[in-house]
Amino acid sequence: MLVEAGHFALALALALSLIQFVVPLWGARANDPVLMAVAPASALAVLACVGFSFLALTCAYLASDFSVVNVVQNSHSAKPLIYKISGVWGNHEGSMLLWVLILALFGGVVALSRNSVPMRLQANTLAVQAAVTVAFLLFILTTSNPFTRMIPPAPEGQDLNPLLQDPGLAIHPPLLYIGYVGFSISFAFACAALIDGRIDAVWARIVRPWTLGAWAFLTLGIAMGSYWAYYELGWGGWWFWDPVENASLMPWLAGTALMHSTVVMEKRDALKVWTILLAILTFSLSLLGTFLVRSGVLTSVHSFAVDPARGTFILVILILFIGGSLTLFAWRAPLLRQGGLFAPVSREGALVLNNLFLATACATVFIGTLYPLALEVLTGEKISVGAPFFNFTFLPLIVPLLLLLPLGQTLAWKRGNFLGTAQRLYAVFGVSLLATILLFAFTYGGPVAAPLGIGLGVYLVLGSLNEIVTRSWSKGTPLAVAWRKARGLPRSAWGTAIAHAGVGLTVIGIAATAWGVEGLGTLKIGERLKAGDYEVRLERVIPRVEANYREDVAVLTVFGSGREVGTLETMKRLYVTRGMPTTEAGILTTGLGQVYASLGEVQPDGSVGIRLYHKPLVLLIWIGSLVMAIGGGISLTDRRLRIGAPVRAKAVPAAVPAE
Amino acid sequence: MVIWIILLMMTAAAVMAVLWPLSRRHAVAHQGDPDTQFYREQVAEIERDLGRGVLLPSEAEAARAEAARRLLRARGLPDEGSVAVGEPALRRRRAASALALSVVPILALATYEIYGSPQLLTQPPGARMQQASEGGNLMQAVAQIEEHLARNPQDGRGWEVIAPVYVRMGRIEDAVRAYEAAVRYQSPDAGRLANYGEALVLARDGLISAEAQAVFEQAVKLDPSAPKPRFYLARAAVQDGQTDKAKAAYLELLGLAPPGAPWAEAVRQELAALGAPQPEPAPSAAAPVGPEAIQGMVAGLASRLEAQGGTAEEWARLMRSYVVLGQRDKAVDAAKRARQSLAQDAQGLKAIDAMAQELKLTDAQP
Amino acid sequence: MTRKQRRLTLIGAAGCVLAIALGLVLYAMNDTIVFFNSPADIQAKNVAPGTRIRLGGLVKEGSVQRGADQQITFEVMDAQAAIKVSYKGLLPDLFREGQGVVAEGVLESPSVFRADSVLAKHDENYMPREVADTLKKQGHWQGEASAAPKTQ
């Protein structure tokens, strides 16, 4: 009964979204506040309906209602509670419902921010957002309905894929979706600005938190997915340039660019047209990402044939929104007023350069991801575009961006002084260079990439800290005063510095992977295997039987430079009834590095294949991402009204630009 | 009934959510112009920063100038003012209300009618509860067998018991594995192999893979008369594009069909899909061919067998046809002739005996 | 600087970055792209030894040999040809004889392939897409039929 009510609520949400799409647009056009007021009211009603619907599905999962096909296919009455809940979005239908729920939730938040958003902007934004909701609800109801019933009910469900029964993967999709859908709000605001033909700093101020929040969540989601792949797939890699990963990286790159250009717009009223375009592109890439993954185009071009309705529907939505918004852009963008002026060497100029590099890098990822698909559809030739392609095209675009980052962050608004800025970074240059040379000397003969990359990372971290230091302390200032001044700095300044330091940490972690070593061997009990300074000894191999799987556990003692540092267990599991084998990697964390072992086949004579890795500083990759997201969050809490005060041409270079 | 009232109330609430803002004539309080508000606050902020010493006076001055410029620009925009009064506004409001009143209930109910399962709303909850508890019991049984099999994976009998349960639960992959184990750990048996093959086919959404085909062939080798593997082999022929072979195989299969065999209808449908003429439809089926035609066909078969002899299968088919037509004496006669004609063929004789037994032609025993 | 000059600077910088990116992409397209081949393709196309390719097909039953230190050899076959693959490392969980596999590495001679990675998807009934397509092309989907029973 609850399930049917939930289903009906979804249908109701569709009808309400249609009203929310039509009436406010009409109201904004006729300039009628009464009609425009329909927007927030209906947005809240849609939220109530979709929320109820999601709740109904969750209840069906909790109660193991096996008259619902979706529950049968993805749940099991004996499954732990957390996986019953995460099973709701651990499948195509449920995850699309979660998508719409987040969309409706954000729509509700926009509807409630009545006092800070001008009425016309709010009405138009909610109308555009309703259009997205209508498309997705139609998609869910017609092709991916989670409420489809099964008569008579199945006696038991088919359970969730064991690989997905993992806490990491339970929260990964919601994080990613909050990111994707957050960008839909920026998109809706951009389209609303185009419809209205008006965009200004007020707009940027309203959009900034959405972009920042979406970006922070997307960062977390990507990092979470990467760490899951690292420990669960047992290959020791943390990023594979797999199309599914690229599908989330592209909106992240575009979103990062958008976040920075919004700053320029808010403070300097410049880059308006570009910001609008970026907002559209970011959400388009989010849509593309969602659908590349959801439609199965990536795992197989032919799954389009398996479910033609779904694939076609997806394509229509993509064309409709991307084509529609770009047409709107081409038509209305020329009407937007030109913004403030700035010199090429200035904070704005640096941010333009940042956008340029990020957008280009995003384009190369786009080409590398879609080219094989296009080629196969057009010529039938099958190719794989892997890590070598991306390393070759992506890195040369990102490294210059990172090199310029601390400089840009230090430049003044409107017109900057390049030399003066560089002077403020002398110490940073020096220390990073010294670090690189020292590392190089100590690891002479090792890979060159590691010291260089780590030097770059150190430079980024120090450059970010330098920004805080120079803004609060100059020669002769007592420390107490400097501290007070630093604490008085706007939170957005802290957020920026922290996020940029996070980038530096991630870069260090990535660069240090060049020092990673691995060993491979067939071990008998008591035999040893070496990987760099670390060594393991196979103690025993024990079979173990658990509720739903059998496993062979290899117990290894780990020695670091001859001393025993711990033990780790790596398993080969067989999920009995599904007959599905998995490898569970054994991981021992030593400081920021990890010793990582995965188990191969157990031979008839009792020896086992072991692959052993030592990955120094590998945790920094994810710690850095976390720090980035935290920086974003801190910046998000800054609700001050900011204006980028230009420094007078004659002002001393060391003068602090105001935030 | 209650549920329909709830659904109607939900609809009413949704419509009200739209109508409510439309009904408030003057209610939209004049919102302070957010633009000028924004810049005023910005200027105030600059003053505060100056006071705290975060800004240098020269910077503050520049920032103020910038904010003032933007404020002027924002104000310079033509303010059209809201038009919420007058006749046209009233008409707009009525039109919007009518739209909400009609679109929301109609669209929602229509969508639900198409995609939902309203017929379930009236099912008494008690029945569902019972089903659920049965499911629970079955589940426990399955869990027990699974546990047993985890410990004794070589118990082919156990695998065979659980396999059809998996099929019914929709766990086709598991069923395939269970049947595979059942086949592996037990002596070869046509029925078991056929079930295994069928599970393989289900797992591939109806596609008969090479693996499944091999299994069916093995089953037919063990028992040439088993209908299930022969049926799937015929379908495999269809998938290979060998329509004629498939037709022949289906026709043969129909000939083998005992009266009222549940699968005969499926075979007929397959044949119809191939565009083949429908031979000797069972009397239970709505026969498009009259009894005379059947008589004719049976007579044709009889005279051919009389004249040229034939396989045991053909003789058996003739016997059954007579039984179907209610001519038992002729069936007995056919059995006798078959035995004569197949005297050299021990296998064939056995098949005829089996058929005679099946048709209960006791008086035809030699 | 006038507005026009500023705009020119901007366009110039954008042009430079885009040109560099385009150059990199085009160069990488020539150099880093790996083609997918089945054993029959390798024979038909006369793929030169030393080429980096992805090889896909079915693991021939009974061909897997495990040597010392995880040195493994097996044969990958399709309906028409077979090729010997040597690989050092751990095989993926779902690697099985008679099942589809994709290996990436270097073709050493027309009949020997040295793989540096062997892929199998995390799905028990997964047939790598490229493999499935090739088999489909070489006859019906049951083209697989002509391949599989031979080895049984």
Image (cartoon, grey):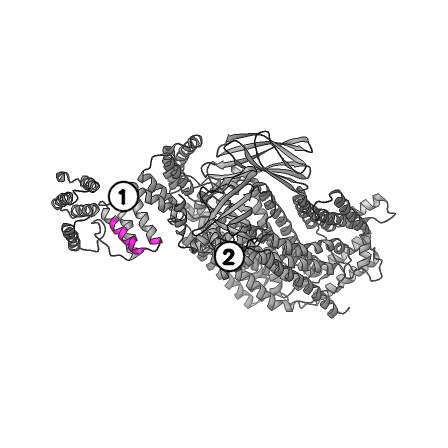
Q: Choose between A57 and B259: the one closer to the eye.
A: B259
State the image coordinates of residue A22 (x, y, percent, origin top left).
Answer: 53, 62
Nearer to us of marks 1 and 2 is: 2
Q: Which amino acid does label 1 sit on?
A: Pro
Q: Choose between B91 and A235: the one closer to the eye.
A: A235
Q: Mark 1 points at which residue?
A: B224
Vertical side of A355 occupied by B362: above or below: above
Disc 1 crowd rating (10 Å Cα; few below 14, some 14-19, many 20+) is: few
Q: Residue A232 carries which label?
A: none
Q: Do the residues labelled 1 and 2 touch (CB within 8 Å)?
A: no
What's drawn in magenta, residue-wise? B238-252
Q: What residue type is labelled 2?
A: Asn
Q: What element carries label 2?
A: loop
Q: Within the magenta stretch, is there residue B251?
A: yes
Q: Choose between A98 and B289: the one closer to the eye.
A: B289
A93 left or right, relative to B214: right
State the image coordinates of residue A369 (x, y, percent, origin top left).
Answer: 57, 56
Q: Distance between the residues labelled 1 and 2?
A: 47 Å
State the image coordinates of residue A305 (x, y, percent, origin top left).
Answer: 44, 56
Quarter of the image with the C terminus of chain B is: top left
Disc 2 crowd rating (10 Å Cα; few below 14, some 14-19, many 20+) is: few
Q: What element carries label 1?
A: loop
Residue B220 makes an appearance in the image: yes
B133 left or right, relative to B334: right
State the image coordinates of residue B147 (x, y, percent, origin top left).
Answer: 44, 31
Residue A19 makes an appearance in the image: no
| Badge 1: chain ID | B
Q: Are marks 1 and 2 on the same chain?
A: no
Q: Within the magenta stretch, is there residue A27?
A: no
Per the picture, the main secondary structure of the magenta-coloured stretch is helix
Q: Name the residue under label 2.
A: C46
